[in-house]
Image (cartoon, rainbow, N blue to C red):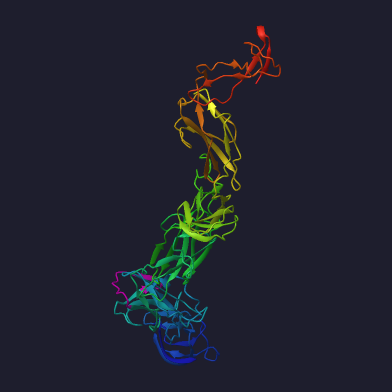
Amino acid sequence: GSAAARISASWPRLRYPEVSWSLSDRRLHLPCSHASAQACGTARGTVLHANVSGLLEGWRYYVCISAPGTTVRHETHNESLPALDECSDGFTVDTKPPVAGCVAAGRRALLPLPPRSANCSAAPVFSASRSEMAVSWHAFTDVEVHGKAVHLSGVRYYQLGLGTQPGLDNVKQFHPVGLSLSTVIRGLALWAGVNYYATIRAYDFSGLWSQATSNPVLHDPQPPTAGHITLGSSRRPLDTGISSHTVLEASWHGFKDAESRGLAFSWALGSRPGASSDVMAFTSVGSFTHGRVNVSGHDGDTVFVTVETSNDAGLTTVVTSSGYLVDLSPPTAGDVYDGDAAAGAHTLFPDADYSSRTSGVLCRWSGFGDPHSHVAEYSLSIGTCATCSDVQSRMSVGLRTSYHRQGLLLTNGRTYYCRVRACNGAGLCTERASDGCTLDSTTPVFGVVSLPSLVTSTRHFVSASSSGFHDVQSSILSYTWQVGSNPGASDLLLPKSTFSELDFQQVGMQVPLPLNQTVYISVEARNRAGITGLQTSPGLRVDTLTPSAALGGLPLFDEQWGGSRLTGTQTSSEGVRVTWRFSASQTPIARHTVTLVGAAGRSALVQK
């Protein structure tokens, strides 16, 4: 719009008795008839005062004077004055204060200001500093028309004040800051929880001013309160800190800040405690309180989750979780054994293939291991096949490496299997079954122990044979021979084992066989379940003395039987009758041998 004003001008031209003047937006003298002339007239002296109207806001106007050349007569001489045509440096019509821009304080002052066309933010920001506050603002604009301004800015200078209400300066009084568009107020003593406002005043060259107030700044000197980190999902937390999942889940809770409106989080993954991030760099998740990351390439590694939270004042709190072991592989399988190491088996073998236990199954195992989380638990099942659990369903046995399951109803002749499952701390498991153990609760079928003779003439040699020993379920594993003065005793010869049913001979007795006493050779047959059966031979006696002829017991021919009365002759040629008498002091005489020899040493005629 247009404006009315009273203008004044002066010029140091005393010798011109009269000048004509004009007011226009051009810097040259215009006649009153010119359309651009806002005002014109004549003036005497060197000062002009005039009321004008129709001036445009923001336009620059010039006062120009003009006078023709003339001669001024003096008492002593005449002075020639040249023609006059001069203009002032102009003035700008400015009836309005500067147009304010946006003001930002606190941390927001350190960020780029929004575009001038955008609305200024009134949202509060937070400051951790008690003694300093940054302030920045848009340049305020004035009404000078582009191209006609004589100053770099329509603003002459700015003032800054700080208070607890918009426009107040009860904390820091208004003071000039020149034409700068940013500054830092120092030497403050801010109180926690109090809002502070920075106010900028802009003064133009007309002395008019306008002001704008910043967003509130709340002093927050404390970092957020630390919370805690939960590994695993919120529904299934990892209480053990060990997981077999290829994706690590973490959530965090309990982080608080009384002054700030909200908290921002970032999290990282490291291979050591503290704020390490060599596995996954810090990743911002905003206000979210959980995250997921793939850890499939870190089998056997222990990782740590670090959460960093910052409040609106920029203060941070860092919390690191306990170690999280990534175990993606199950335990290595070991070996499962049946029964005792020596029960029914040779002691060199750790496994029993047969057992005589009718009400229980003994299982043993070894060699299971895990290089990462170790074996956390064993469980055992028993069945009639390697994959069955029809005798005993799976049950936990802790960390024991053997278990005797009693109170079972087992069937003779049936094979039973132990199946062991080993699980590590991550819950991954490995199973292995034994090769089975057959129940044999019956003794072997006894055979016969035979002697070549019930009498022997030597005290340092015995021999015997056995036959007929067998076992239907587990077969015969070994035989044990022994010699004693009673059936089953071994006082004359300690037990000697053999793995086959063969004739037994022993040369060189440990103790000579006793005289006038019966000795016995015994055979103990052991089946593969460890059950034995003992069989003993008939009694054997030692006779080291030869029979002797009793008194009058020499062999004699019965001549009367032969039908002859002549001594030394007989009439019958069909045979002879001989009588004799022998005696034996140790054993009865078993047999007699009669030899009839011809006269004069001729060969034997008969031997019987």
Picture residue at 42% right of the left edge, 65% below the top: 229
* Image quarter of residue 12: bottom left
Percent across and percent down for residue 396 are 48, 59
Front-most of residues 283 and 17 = 283
Question: Compared with residue 316, is residue 33 higher up or lower down, i.e. above or below?
Answer: below
Percent across and percent down for residue 557 are 61, 16
Q: Is residue 55 left or right of residue 319?
A: right
Percent across and percent down for residue 358 are 51, 54
Part of the protein shown in magenta: 177-194
Picture residue at 63% right of the left edge, 17% below the top: 560
Picture residue at 33% right of the left edge, 82% below the top: 165
Question: Compared with residue 133, is residue 344 higher up or lower down, i.e. above or below?
Answer: above
Picture residue at 51% right of the left edge, 49% below the top: 339
Question: Compared with residue 251, is residue 469 higher up or lower down, i.e. above or below?
Answer: above
* Residue 191 is one of the magenta-drawn residues: yes
Which quarter shows the C terminus? top right
* Image quarter of residue 91: bottom left
User: Is residue 67 among the parts visible in the rendering?
Assistant: no
